[in-house]
Image: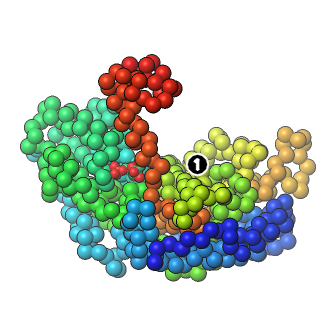
Amino acid sequence: MSLPKIDPTSTKSWSDLSRHFDSIKNQKMQDWFVSDPKRAEKMAVSWNEFYLDYSKNRVSEETLNLLLNLADEVGLKDAIEAQFTGKEINETEGRAVLHTALRDFRNMKPEVNASLQKIRSFSNRLISGEWKGATGKSITDVVNVGIGGSDLGPDMVCEALKFYKNHLNVHFISNVDGDHVMETIKDLDRETTLFVVVSKTFTTQETLTNAQTIRRWFLEERDETDIARHFVAVSTNLEDVAAFGIASENIFPMWNWVGGRFSLWSAVGLSIACAVGYENFEKLLRGAHEMDLHFRESAVSENIPVILAMLSIWYNNFFGAESECIVPYSQYLNKLVAYLQQGIMESNGKSTDRNGNAVNYQTGTIVWGSTGTNAQHAFFQLIHQGTKLIPTDFICFSEALHKQTDHQNKLMANCFAQTEALLQGTYGSEAENSYKVFEGNKPTNTLLIEKLSPENLGSLIAMYEHKLFVQGVVWNIFSYDQWGVELGKKLAKNTLGAIESGSPDMANNSSTRSLIKKTI
Ligand code: F6P
């Protein structure tokens, strides 16, 4: 069985929720906290080193029950099983979706195990200095060349786990903007740099262009035969990688049952293993697997990804919230939001349902955000006093890695104080004037995690992966394809032809034609 194909708006729970929404939409969380002193205790989940407090949401116990009924009515349990057991739930591409199999050490596919062993051995040799460049020098710099899922995940994780890093410098080149590649390689030493070309398809314009530019730069001073010591690739497309000149023993495999935006757990994460060592890479995977088990096995009422997903649906589909904000109180996580934007928005930015019909309800959430406390001094004003409802996830860690108690106390105080201010506002107290009135009643989740360890980071990423899957199931859309990005790629080819040949008239549209005329 593939995924159930139930229009959520046709369910009894949806009608119940619509009715319930009318009765609750103007109520104040501030009052609920007063009338129920146990609210915070009741609306929280403790799991491993995670503590999720979702009490500051505009939900009553009845709302939660109705939301969980909706999950049940659209067949969430079956959908979860269909995903984990490898059914072809990516129906429009005829593929299974098994990023969870990349981190299932109890039940590992032989090819996954072989790939992990290859990652282990390669990263160990690189880190120890045993792997030599063509002139006999050890590698000092590793450059990941990829884009989208072949860039964002490894880049984000290398940044997030900087505390655990070894001596290797890791760089990321993604944009087809030539300034990105040239700026990154300008100070690199050809004799001590290793390039990891990551492309699932090995057809992506940006990655191939960057890889060719780097290859030319490399060959300015070195020979073709040296490529084997300085270039490796991660791809499903072995033929094209070989044609590029990368030796077959330097190719790390990928599989079409792993979506690009869920691929950091595969050899796409090679740069992570190089940066923090294979043991930490494996810990990341094990942490994600723990979250997989939690998601697959826990009752929905205790299930962190399910709760987060259903709360988000509540705001998106009933309150009409336009976006969601994510604010990690850790500078190490400054790339988390960009990473999640691809995962969430490339997956759920769909308007055709699983029956092939146009949806008549809102789907994919817009996610944005930045690190706390910086965000407080940037866009928080709008969340506090603007006209839009912006549910916000606060993510923080009880233990500071560098053990700066003074800083840590202030960081946590700010995080907790913001969620309280958003909840309470100036409600119940006299504001000096109307400009100082804070309505409060703004929804937040607080995810308090013991420490930013590789395991907990793995669990955190997997949590958002499962959250977006649940949302896709409820919205009756296919979360694992991305046809929307294809049209732009096709048009870019045509437009490139027009620019390169100096023939603006090749472009289909008059605005594009004018723009090209100004460029050439
Ligand atoms: O353009 C979108 C996309 O297909 C992403 O889904 C993917 O992560 C990215 O391009 C890169 O693709 P590839 O790894 O095949 O180069």
**Quadrant in which residue 165 is drawn:** bottom left
Snapshot colouring: rainbow
Residue under the image location 16 percent in, 40 percent down: 191
Spot occupied by residue 472 in the image (x, y as percentages of width and height): 55, 64
- Label 1: few (<14), some (14–19) or many (≥20) C-alpha neighbours in 10 Å: some
Vertical order, 261 against 177 (above or below): below
Spot occupied by residue 149 in the image (x, y as percentages of width and height): 40, 53
Give whichever of 233, 157 is nearer the camera: 233
The residue beneath circle 1 is: 368
Specify whether residue 478 is in view: yes
Specify whether residue 131 is in view: no
Residue under the image location 25 percent in, 74 percent down: 110
Residue under the image location 64 percent in, 61 percent down: 312
Spot occupied by residue 509 in the image (x, y as percentages of width and height): 49, 29
Give whichever of 359, 112 is nearer the camera: 359
Question: The disc labelled 1 sits on which kind of residue?
Answer: Trp
Vertical order, 230 against 128 (above or below): above
Spot occupied by residue 233 in the image (x, y as percentages of width and height): 23, 52
- Badge 1 element: strand
Residue under the image location 64 percent in, 40 percent down: 378
